[in-house]
Amino acid sequence: MSENASGQIDTVMTEDRLFPPSEEFASKSAIGSMEAYQQLYDEVKADPTAYWDKVAREELHWFKPYDTVLEWNNPLAKWFIGGRTNVSYNCLDAHLDTERRNKAAIIFEGEPGDIRTLTYQQLHREVCKFANVLKGLGVKQGDVVSIYMPMTPELLIAMQACARIGAVHSVIFAGFSAEAIADRNNDASAKIQLTADAAWRRGKQLPLKEVVDEALAKSPTVEKCIVLRRVGNEVSMQEGRDCWWHDLMDEASADCPAEPLDSEAPLFILYTSGSTGKPKGIKHTTAGYILWAKKTFEWVFDYRDEDIFWCTADCGWITGHSYVAYGPLAAGATVMMYEGAPNWPADDRFWDIIERHKVNILYTAPTAIRAFIKWGDGHVDKHDLSSLRLLGTVGEGINPEAWMWYHEKIGGERCPIVDTWWQTETGGIMMSPLPGAIPTKPGSCTKPLPGVIPSIVDEELQEVPQNHGGMLCVAQPWPGMLRGIWGDDERFKEQYWTKVPGKYLTGDNARTDDDGYYWIMGRIDDVINVSGHRLSTIEVESALVSHDTVAEAAAVGRPDEIKGQAIAVFVTIKGDAQPTDELRKELRLHVRKEIGALAQPDDIRFTGALPKTRSGKIMRRLLRDIASGTEQAGQDTSTLEDYSVLAKLRDDEE
Ligand code: WTA
């Protein structure tokens, strides 16, 4: 273990398994060796403006060329100043004069099993029509459109239609409450609401329109509501306010040229929860965002024209924005889109989809992978997954044992895994292996993408040496970076640009290893301080998950008179294991053996489930309060996926 200095974080994890891409994979990749990656990385680093100028000219369509590549008045960046372009044009029209026009843009499968394929030409037509629907309702450039819809093609069509006319979309995941929708609508002054009668979820109907009715009662700026008929249940339609999607589409013209928009015209707002306080509306703009989404998609997924790419994220999250609705379409890819739950009608739905559609690239979240492990290998073994050639993860650190399972069971030991680190704020992937070039290590997001200059600093703002953890920052602007928090410039400055002047503060801790590989160590707020040693949550959790019986674990600190903080862990165990004192003892010893006595948990609590956000991240902040018995009434739990989990944890405590 390393010495602690100026608030650095100690690392206790050692992982030396290394998985280079196969020769076959590398030989077909656009970037096929570590040297090729390094050369590109160095080229962009040496002269970012020249590089992005070249790429923006080659890869984006411009109605009017820009005058200046970048203006950087920290913390405000402007990219491709003076240019006019359109995101929807780059995703759709750009392919219509090429052989891609009759290629599948979207292959959609609904939860009940309905399948629909839209070619680029067909998708273009739908987007144009819906853009005209919006115009017909008086939506103008800069107006905010609030979207609360199921994961169907219409959700993507709505996003693209907004982009086409310069309206700003705010997609709210269709699992949030009426209160959460109203908060977001009011913060953004949304003018139009889009929703559906209901959504399918595990065979049940989620009554979206009912939730929206309640939200709109508290959203005075919303004038109209467009309702998609998805499920066919009875809904109440308010005269003068509510209209059916299909009625409006029937009347709409398919002629809607893309609006030439300023490079910095806002494209969307996406609300993300802060660790405290009200959600913040992260703002992204036009040219830089789409360029970043497209390039990172091509680099990280090594996309080839014949591939079917499946990102399982809902368009309610940034991952669904950048790697379902925008990046892949800009690159001319075929996107698999699935509406429902991974365990409906059975726990093998994902593998069934992959087998039937012959999906080639799967991009999903560690929380899903840990659930698959818990559900058992039998569901996987039933299916032929040989179409897969590349796997990816996003959203949280992946514990090495879960990585190994993904590699062996899903990837058949032949598919590289891209562990992609990024944030809503970064607009696209920031660190990830390039699968044909960079050998992977389980649990590491490996290397920064070209154009990303990471910097890890301690509390004194000094760069930390290798093998020391510190605050992860980004030292230079990149095209996809956030352009602000909607309506709150102060919070934007304060949150991301103040603590470490001149650099973007990510809020995560990280370290590099001897090979210069990056390891994300969790959120800065989640660090556990034991006897003056600052430990990262992910390392303790990964040690626990490497035990046979453990499906999932969350580690938090609670106050301790002697050590400063003690380590409390919440553990879910696999189906056949028993939550006994014996097992507690064994787990303690296991962690001690894996990473050392210092990291040995003080409290081990077994639980059926962990509290998670709706996008699957463990909410350690809530667990911290439970562990220390200091739950605060004012805590923001609006992003919690399942309230009963929290209630259950509280009960267990008593
Ligand atoms: C975490 C999701 C470790 C991290 C795209 C980040 C990760 C936050 C990884 C952003 C990863 C995301 N390894 N941690 N590969 N990917 N995170 O805004 O804490 O939903 O700051 O964006 O998720 O979450 P967000």
Image (cartoon, rainbow, N blue to C red):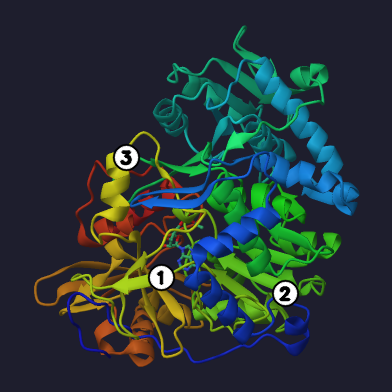
Q: Nearer the viewer, residue 601 or 430?
A: 430
Amino acid tagged 1:
Pro
Looking at the image, is mark 3 or mark 2 earlier in the sequence?
Answer: 2
Which numbered marker is on residue 454? 1
Rounded to the nearest whole Å, what is the CA distance between mark 3 and mark 2? 40 Å
Say which element carries label 3.
helix
Say which element carries label 1.
strand
Q: Position of residue 326 (x, y in %)?
A: 65, 48
Looking at the image, is mark 2 or mark 1 earlier in the sequence?
Answer: 2
Looking at the image, is mark 3 or mark 1 earlier in the sequence?
Answer: 1
Dot 3, how many residues are within 10 Å of its Cα: few (below 14), some (14-19), or many (20+)? Answer: few
Among all residues in the image, which is located at the extreme front? Answer: 67
Amino acid tagged 2:
Ala
The residue beneath circle 2 is 30
Q: Nearer the viewer, residue 159 or 462?
A: 462
- Lateral position of residue 390 relative to residue 306, left or right: left
The residue beneath circle 3 is 489
Tell me which residue sits at (71%, 59%) in the image.
310
Marks 3 & 1, CB-CB < 8 Å contact:
no
Q: Position of residue 11 (x, y in %)?
A: 32, 83
Q: Quadrant of residue 498?
A: bottom left
Q: Nearer the viewer, residue 124 or 82?
A: 82
